[in-house]
Amino acid sequence: MAEARVVIVGGGFAGLNAAKHLGNKEGVHVTLIDRRNHHLFQPLLYQVALAALSPADIATPIRSVLSDYENVDVLLGNVRTVDFQHKKVTAGFGAVPYDYLILACGANHSYFGRDDWEEYAPGLKSLEEATEIRRRVLMAYEMAERTHDRELQKEYLTFVIVGGGPTGVEMAGAIGEMSRYTLGRDFRNLDPRNTRIILVEGASRILNAFDSELSMKAARGLEKLGVTIWTNSRVTDITPYGVKIGEETVRACTVLWAAGVRPAELSHRLGVPLDSAGRVSVEGDLSIPGHPDVFVLGDQAHFEHNTPDGNALPGLAPVAIQMGRHVARNILREVRGQSREPFQYRDKGIMATIGRADAIVQVGKIRFGGMFAWLTWLFVHIMYLVGFKNRMLVMIQWFWSYVTLSRGARLVTSRNWKSEKRFELAYRYINTFEAASKAAREKNAGKNGTKQTTRAKKTAKVMRKSAVRKKGLRKTAARAKAVRKKALRKKK
Ligand SMILES: Cc1cc2nc3c(=O)[nH]c(=O)nc-3n(C[C@H](O)[C@H](O)[C@H](O)COP(=O)(O)OP(=O)(O)OC[C@H]3O[C@@H](n4cnc5c(N)ncnc54)[C@H](O)[C@@H]3O)c2cc1C
């Protein structure tokens, strides 16, 4: 009998576990397609973003993870469409036919319809984003060290994190920890402890998925690290200069996004029922209604059968892992002529770190925080990391960081070599145009006379022209122009 062709799209927690479970099993041939060549351990991404770990510590080439499975092929490619009728998926390199299809494409950021905010407030989902956040955070300190303008320094040292879920909390805690314990000795012209970290949450408390006492405990832990928490607060705008929260404007050099996720784009191209968040609604065996040979797993799926609270399962690694293994088991059962079994999630609990040696853990009715919770968190994350080498490396690095209070991966790297220049230029424009508006205000008040205003206006004009010439800086220039216009209006 011919082998059943199983195509898996996505080598994240769900896809990789399905592939491993089908690996070296009789009756199936597996093709795993991922647009990246590596499996990423997302729960530790913030450690890369905040310079505690290096990218290679938390990512492993998918090819090497699956190299021992003779019946598994790995292909690098972005799957664009699925043809249910002809049973094939199409990626950039061509079409791949299937008998069974497993879609496990994960999730992306959601900016709630304001995708233009992404440029000023990157989210944390990939290694590229993590290193970009690391670059922005470290550059903010570098820029603050260079300036003698205290007001500007304050802006460089203000970090706003939007979203008080586990990712936002972990990022805020890590910046607090870094500013308090790690950077102190490295800078001469600034005191990193003056770092201002604002965590903005729309709900009435942070870490909504946790018990309220644990959430309060986490809030106290963050406050000790210098984090200010703004609850019941909604971000209404994000610009290169900071954020608008309700009617209040906070000037900040670095804004980070941890507020919303939406499932992979492929879901919208399937033509199947989606929930309000864009996840594919699946049956009890994780297949798509009307397509029993197509399964959707992990963050991409909306599964609400037999869940403890009747709600859809959350986007968590254990959910994705269990789904991947379950679908693989069902495919093997069917190939052997047995019937499928429904999926039943076994709740493994939730946890979040707050900072150095502090975390919260909630497993069923068991709740605890502090050092023991942090050790539990450490143990679980080490266990789930893919690859023995990664486990050892991460353990050694954590131990070293814990003892020496250091962060070994404080490297400013850039995907786009022009971006540092862009960053600097943007700030230079802001300063110049602010100088222009200040001069205009002063003139208005009869203090400094026409001379200063004219000079500031001239400088502003020259800089704006040069900005327009540089690709990608047009937006900044337009905003700068608006500032200048406003200043001139006031003058009149
Ligand atoms: C910063 C962060 C911290 C987190 N912390 C925790 C935590 O502490 N505990 C926890 O349980 N969960 C945590 N999560 C959630 C957890 O990581 C996800 O629930 C889990 O990764 C979902 O697994 P998945 O397989 O569905 O998707 P993913 O792991 O996201 O994998 C999806 C894969 O699909 C690939 N892909 C997507 N589209 C295509 C396409 N069109 N073609 C080809 N390939 C494609 C992607 O490249 C990726 O490799 C965190 C998530 C993030 C972002």
Image (spheres, rainbow, N blue to C red):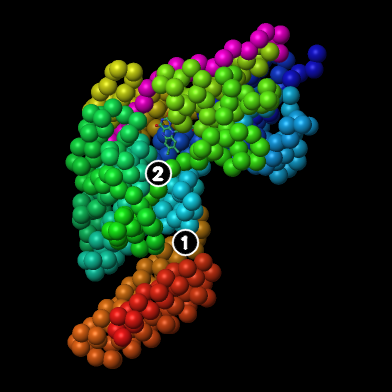
**408 left or right, relative to 438:** right
Q: Quadrant of the N terminus?
A: top right
Task: Measure the C-alpha gap from mark 2 to mark 1.
Answer: 25 Å
The residue that label 2 is drawn on is: 259
SS category of the residue bearing label 2: loop
In the image, which residues are magenta?
Answer: 335-358
Q: Residue at x 22, y 62 (%)?
A: 189
**Residue 399 shows in this picture:** no
Q: Are marks 2 and 1 in contact (CB under 8 Å)?
A: no
3 part of magenta stretch:
no
User: Any mark on residue 127, and which?
Assistant: none
* Image vertical order of residue 121 relative to residue 418, above or below: above
Q: Quadrant of the C terminus?
A: bottom left
SS category of the residue bearing label 1: helix
The residue that label 1 is drawn on is: 419
Q: Residue at x 28, y 91 (%)?
A: 450
Residue 23 at x, y percent in the picture: 64, 20
